[in-house]
Amino acid sequence: MSLEDLKEKLSKVVDPGDMVPRDYEKDGCLLEIKARADQVEAVAKAAREADCFLESITAVDFTNGPQIIYQFNSCTIVSRVLVRVQLSRGESVVSIGSIYDAALWYEREVFELFGIRFDNHPDLRRLLLPEDADFYPLLKDYGKVHAFRSTEEIYGE
């Protein structure tokens, strides 16, 4: 499948005006898509049908809300595609774990670090932090982390 075929499949799901060609040498991707939260599942299905695999899911916390970034690629052609989904604070997005098994781990990581919920995720619990942690360490409002310099600061010895 060519990059043009992939673009054609994706243009049935998102507005072609939201698909921006990129310079692979400069940006590391060939196509960037701005999608809405309600388009994520359809975009993932289109990428899967185009024989793309999921490289990663991550997020960035901006002042106007978090943005999820999905990265798809293909083994047959160089076709890295970034899909950016801007969310408002507290907004959730549907899990794509039923389309890509690997998404389940990425989504858990994004939930743990940013607090973004993935609807229909079968096991959305923390990976590294305690289950009862009431914070999301990569949010801008998390604050500064106090680093202890000595055991005396911790234990008072």
Image (tube, rainbow, N blue to C red):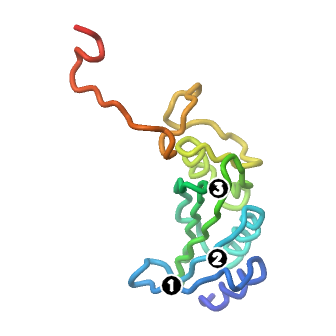
The relative height of residue 135 versus residue 80 in the rendered view (above or below) is above
The relative height of residue 74 versus residue 3 in the rendered view (above or below) is above
Marks 2 and 3 sit apart, C-alpha to C-alpha, by 15 Å
Rendered location of residue 107, percent (x, y): 61, 50
Q: Disc 2 vs disc 3: Cβ atoms closer than 8 Å?
A: no
Q: Disc 1 vs disc 2: Cβ atoms closer than 8 Å?
A: no
Rendered location of residue 31, percent (x, y): 56, 81
Q: Amino acid at mark 1?
A: Arg
131 and 90: which is toward the camera: 90
Q: Disc 3 vs disc 1: Cβ atoms closer than 8 Å?
A: no
SS for tag 1? loop
Q: Amino acid at mark 3?
A: Asp
151 and 75: which is toward the camera: 151
Q: Is residue 151 left or right of residue 142?
A: left
Rendered location of residue 62, percent (x, y): 54, 56
The relative height of residue 124 versus residue 41 in the rendered view (above or below) is above
Residue at label 1? 22
Q: Quick one: label 3 or label 1, which is nearer the N terminus?
A: 1
Q: Quick one: label 1 or label 2, which is nearer the N terminus?
A: 1
Q: Quadrant of residue 54?
A: bottom right
Residue at label 2? 51
SS for tag 3? loop
Which residue is depicted at the point 54% across and 34% down? 135
Which residue is depicted at the point 59% across and 88% down? 3
Which residue is depicted at the point 63% across and 36% down? 125
Quadrant for the N terminus, please: bottom right
Q: Nearer the viewer, mark 1 or mark 2?
A: 1
